[in-house]
Amino acid sequence: MVRFLISPPEGWTLPQISPQSTVVAAPVAVSPDGRRIAFIAVGADGTSQLWIRSLDTLGAQALPGTERGASPFWSPDSRSLGFFADGKLKRIDISGGPTRTVCDVVDGRGGSWSRDGVIVFNPGIASPLQKVSAGGGVPSVATELGQGEGDHRQPFFLPDSGRFLYLATAAGDATSVYVASVDSTERKLLVTVDSSEVVYSQSHLLFVRETTLMAQAFDTQRLELTGEPFPIAEQIQMNGGGTPYAIFSASANGTLAYQAGASAGGSQLVWLDRTGKRTGTLGDPAGYRDIQLAPDGKRVAVAIAASVGSSDIWLYDVARGLRARFTFDAASEFTPVWSPDGASVVFRSNRKGPNNLYRRVASGAGSDDVVLEDSSQKFPTSWSPDGRSLLYTNTGSSNDLFVLPMANDRPATGSEGRKPIPFLQTPFNEGNGQFSPDGRWVAYRSNDSGAGPFEIYVVPFPGPGGKWLVSTAGGDFPRWRRDGTEIFYLATDSTLMAASVNGKGSSFEVGAVTALFQMRRGGPGWPYDVSPDGRRFLVNALPEQQDTSTPITVVMNWQAALSRR
């Protein structure tokens, strides 16, 4: 057994990883022949790119055209890489040449490439797996969601090429590993694990329990695990809320790569002025995600990770810096949205499988009320100033914006009143909608440009009407200044932008767009909110001491550990 470390090229960093990190899933991939490692590195401008490190060289090779790439996976001949970027499943030959689009995706969560030229992949949150020809085409169904399952992700083809492993997530349960075939949706349960990653290497399945990388003998003919699992690496880094990703990869011939030293520090809520200068902090470091200030700016609702696969919403008193737990279910609660009067909070929870919407009064009294419960995956984004409409994203075949009629902080009564109303429903991906302070406009993100990153647009509410482009070169997470004169958003390099706008007339006007400062995001979900006067920003940031990330550990011939048992 031989171990060594791989660090990123000079001027680049490996993605910052913690149990609550926003880092793209599966940022490391070992080639099937065990001779190369693909990894994601982040440049000084915050843009990620794919790199290749051949183990017989001292340097890494950048792959132009893979900016913003996520979840790389190899072709079976180790000559090409598949990856997800800009709402597409793409491929690139590592010897050179342009990237090629295989098909559209919403938000890919892992793929695998068979020897027969079939790619099985996850097209987005709350989705089963799909399959498509590696040469491109229209995807078809590869798996079907079981009762209570949230999604299927991280497929991995076995050596026979026709069968693959994948993971199924379900609320409140450990992730289940199944084996299935490209020719059938039938499946067989193998084992339960604690993360969304499993690979086959040297006649063993590799998976993570807590933060320990385990190996267990696996018979690929009988499709059965044998013997007891045993540890081969400790403190594997985990990223993401809900069901986390374990950062490891391995080839069939015994090359293993992983990142160790999982951070327990989480992130920090930091107050910044318009120049990016730190003016204060709120609370202690923790696993924060999804920040939202109350309409009066005096309280903050934020989700905090309680353990692997579980989080709750807490409320902070801004002036006193004290927090109180707001939700108590054993599942995960995310994405709080305040009512316009600050009297209640709507949030999403996966306590029944899909992410359904619930409401609780801000005082914490009483129980959680069901706002919207169905089989779709959804999360709330904004509540209209008049209290009558709740805007939420429905993550189906593509992300769409829907409106749920509300009355007195509750869903409107009557069968028609409770029915969600499509607001923006297109073949493209819309999301993160935000009502303007006067309720006449909605700012949102969309990839309807057909290529490149998301952009920020504004449309009238309830519509119909025109559409105005706000961002200049990609954007996400729009927020309105409380007087309606600015829209803030996050550029693709994590720079916070401010766009001067005027929505008082019948037509919307967009003025100058100014870069304010670059964020060091420390958690998933909504990374910031703005004070009512537009002068301060509460940011979910990496702690200052987390300026560098752990290098990649490479283990050659990991199976030599078997002889020591």
Image (cartoon, rainbow, N blue to C red):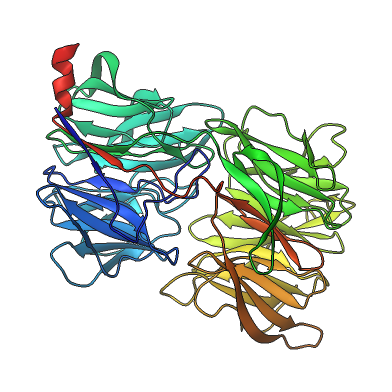
Q: Which sits in the foreground, 291 or 180?
A: 291
| Residue 194 vertical placement versus 56 (above, below) | above
Q: Is residue 349 visible?
A: no
Q: What residue lies at 66% left-to-right and 48% top-to-bottom?
A: 269
Residue 268 place in picture, x, y as percent: 62, 45
| Residue 344 vertical placement versus 306 (above, below) | below
Figure label count = 0
| Residue 372 vertical placement versus 188 (above, below) | below
Q: Quadrant of residue 213?
A: top left
Q: Is residue 158 left or right of residue 302?
A: left
Q: Which sits in the foreground, 21 or 543?
A: 543
Q: Is residue 108 left or right of residue 2?
A: right
Q: Is residue 40 visible?
A: yes
Q: Quadrant of residue 531?
A: bottom right
* Position of the C terminus by quadrant: top left
* Position of the N terminus by quadrant: top left
Residue 366 place in picture, x, y as percent: 86, 31
Q: Which sits in the foreground, 54 or 340?
A: 54
Q: What residue lies at 31% left-to-right and 65% top-to-bottom?
A: 66
Residue 436 place in picture, x, y as percent: 76, 71
Residue 262 place in picture, x, y as percent: 44, 34
Q: What residue lies at 67% left-to-right and 38% top-to-bottom?
A: 284
